[in-house]
Amino acid sequence: MKLLFVHQNELREMGVKSLALFGSVAREDATETSDLDLLVDFDRPIGYFHFFDVQEYLQKILSVPKVDLVMRNAVIDELKEDIYTEALDVL
């Protein structure tokens, strides 16, 4: 996750306020086919196109085939406790 720190300025310019890792990578039970799950908070309202630009940028800088980017305020109630408990702040 050092790459996120290296690209921190670019991510901040894109409106990323915070990122947290969750899912199989955070639990250390990922396989080679696992995706990377990230919770994101933005410092301003964003549209779909910008959201997907950020997702693609993260896939590129992290060199992973799939990043599942989830806005923190969009997590459904049934999953909040599990996701927030395992989430690791990375930016």
Image: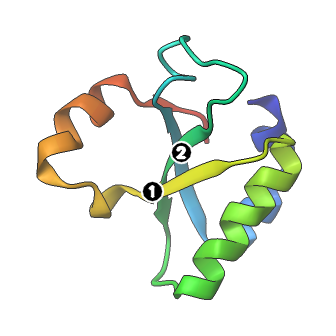
User: Residue 10: which quarter of the image?
Assistant: bottom right
In the rendered image of this protein, does residue 80 appear above or below residue 41?
Answer: above
Q: How is the image coloured?
A: rainbow
- Name the residue rendered at 62%, 38% in the picture: 35
Let me know if residue 88 appears in the view: yes
Q: What element carries label 1?
A: strand
| 2 with respect to 21 (left or right) | right
Question: Are circles 1 and 2 on residues that touch, CB within 8 Å?
Answer: yes
In the rendered image of this protein, does residue 24 appear above or below residue 17?
Answer: above
Most foreground residue, 54 or 2: 54
x, y (%) of residue 64?
A: 79, 41
- Name the residue rendered at 50%, 39% in the picture: 20
- How many residues crowd around disc 2 within 10 Å: few (fewer than 14), some, or many (20 or more)? many
x, y (%) of residue 5?
A: 78, 40
- Quadrant occupied by the C terminus: top right
Q: Distance between the residues labelled 1 and 2?
A: 6 Å
Residue picked out by circle 1? 70
- Quadrant occupied by the N terminus: top right
Please give the label number shown on residue 20. Answer: none
Disc 1 residue type?
Val
Disc 2 residue type?
Leu
- Name the residue rendered at 54%, 55% in the picture: 69
Please give the label number shown on residue 38. Answer: 2
